Amino acid sequence: MMSKKTFVLIDNDTLIHKMWEMAAKKAQVKLFAFKSIEDFIINSKQLSTDTPIYIDSDLDDGVRGEVDSEKIFKLGFRKIYLATGQVELDITPYPWISKLVSKRPSF
């Protein structure tokens, strides 16, 4: 049996988690959803570094996804997408981010 495609969401908003979880179920993909970068890092060893990671820009307490996702990049993950409603955000200072995308699930 072929394994399911896996995605990661890092967002502190439980409604966004629910939206992604429903979309993942419908698309029959596997989703790991975390509320913080630290939660992701603790669980990252179980994931392939090929796994696409979608991270929110505003993670509360001054944590910026575009800045702190460098920690994820340093773990070897290369498919890091900033999932935000801030379409005008300039990601050029953050070369570890592959692309700026909307908060809608990409599957």
Image: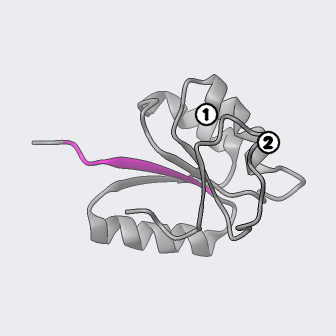
The boundaries of the magenta stretch are 3-10
Instruction: Using the rendered view, name the quadrant where residue 21 is placed.
Output: bottom left
Residue neighbourhood size for the residue with mark 2, other residues' Cα within 10 Å, grouped as few (<14), some (14–19), many (≥20): some
Judging by the rendered image, the residue that carries numbered circle 1 is 42
Residue at the far right in the pictured view: 62
- Taken as a whole, is the magenta stretch helix, strand or loop? strand
Q: On screen, 8 above or below 102?
A: above
Q: Is residue 15 magenta?
A: no
Secondary structure beneath disc 2?
helix
Horizontal side of 50 relative to 36 (left or right) equals left
- Label 2 sits on what residue type? Val
Task: Give the numbered dot on residue 19.
Answer: none
Q: Quadrant of the N terminus?
A: top left
Q: On screen, 106 above or below 85?
A: above
- Label 1 sits on what residue type? Ile
Judging by the rendered image, the residue that carries numbered circle 2 is 67
Q: Quadrant of the C terminus?
A: bottom left
Residue at x 75% of width, y 47% of height: 66
Horizontal and vertical percent position of residue 27? 29, 66
Horizontal side of 64 relative to 49 (left or right) equals right
